[in-house]
Image (cartoon, coloured by chain):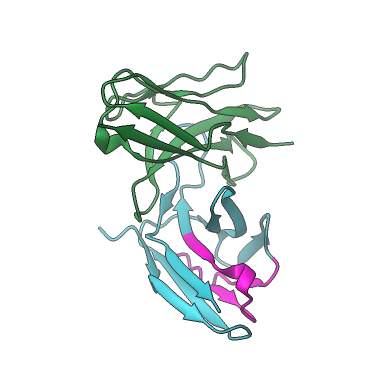
Chain colours: A green, B cyan
Amino acid sequence: AQRVTQPEKLLSVFKGAPVELKCNYSYSGSPELFWYVQYSRQRLQLLLRHISRESIKGFTADLNKGETSFHLKKPFAQEEDSAMYYCALKPLSGTYKYIFGTGTRLKVLA
Amino acid sequence: NAGVTQTPKFQVLKTGQSMTLQCAQDMNHEYMSWYRQDPGMGLRLIHYSVGAGITDQGEVPNGYNVSRSTTEDFPLRLLSAAPSQTSVYFCASSYSGGGGGRGAFFGQGTRLTVV
């Protein structure tokens, strides 16, 4: 079954501390992986995607096919990073459906 | 550069009433979808469409109808509202291509309360 698992509902860290939001997926083929961010009462926005291997707002994520993980990392958290983060999977071909995890709320404490 | 536009932003319905949530995109995306967002459950796919005239059910389709008469519009109809449909609804659109896709673009959401 296709599934995206985000084991942490809430992650609290202090400003300046490293952050890692976990994402594990279950998919038999080759997926595209994404991280979306939702700031308070706003729409979801694409944060980054594994194919582009980019760093956005200091966040990076590496696809580990062996561990089927796509964890989101930032070395030094900022208060403005406080938001809801969703990991999502889309098969590379055959379907356009996105599968979302249940989300992790990140709180960065002053 | 409107992107994905949803209306209304807020709505209160009485049980049994019907309504339509509107969604429009101006990016010529083939793929459009509706999600509901509930605490602790993430985003769950209600219905989706891969092009005009083509729709299919997602994970939680009961109580909802959709149609796709044009590429731009993808309305979601609640047939007979129930309190269990109290949620935040998001419309999304994306390119159909795989490999290097730019991800899905989301509307601003509709906060629906059914009393």
Q: Which corner quadrant of the image does residue B34 belong to?
A: bottom right
Is residue B65 visible to the viewer in this orientation of the structure? no
- Report the residue at 55% width, 55% height from top: B38
Q: Which corner quadrant of the image does residue A85 belong to?
A: top left
Q: Quadrant of the N terminus of chain A?
A: top right
Q: Is residue B51 left or right of residue A29?
A: left
Height in image: B93 above or below A57?
below
- Residue A71 inside the magenta-drawn segment: no
Height in image: B18 above or below A85?
below
Height in image: A72 above or below B84?
above
Query: Could you say where residue A110 lies in the image, as x and y percent from the top left?
Result: 25, 31
| Along the viewing direction, whichever of B10 and B59 lies nearer the viewer | B10
Q: Is residue B16 left or right of residue B103?
A: right
Query: Could you say where residue B21 lies in the image, as x and y percent from the top left?
Result: 48, 73
- Report the residue at 44% width, 67% height from top: B111
Q: Which residues are magenta?
A: B62-90
- Report the residue at 56% width, 42% height from top: A102
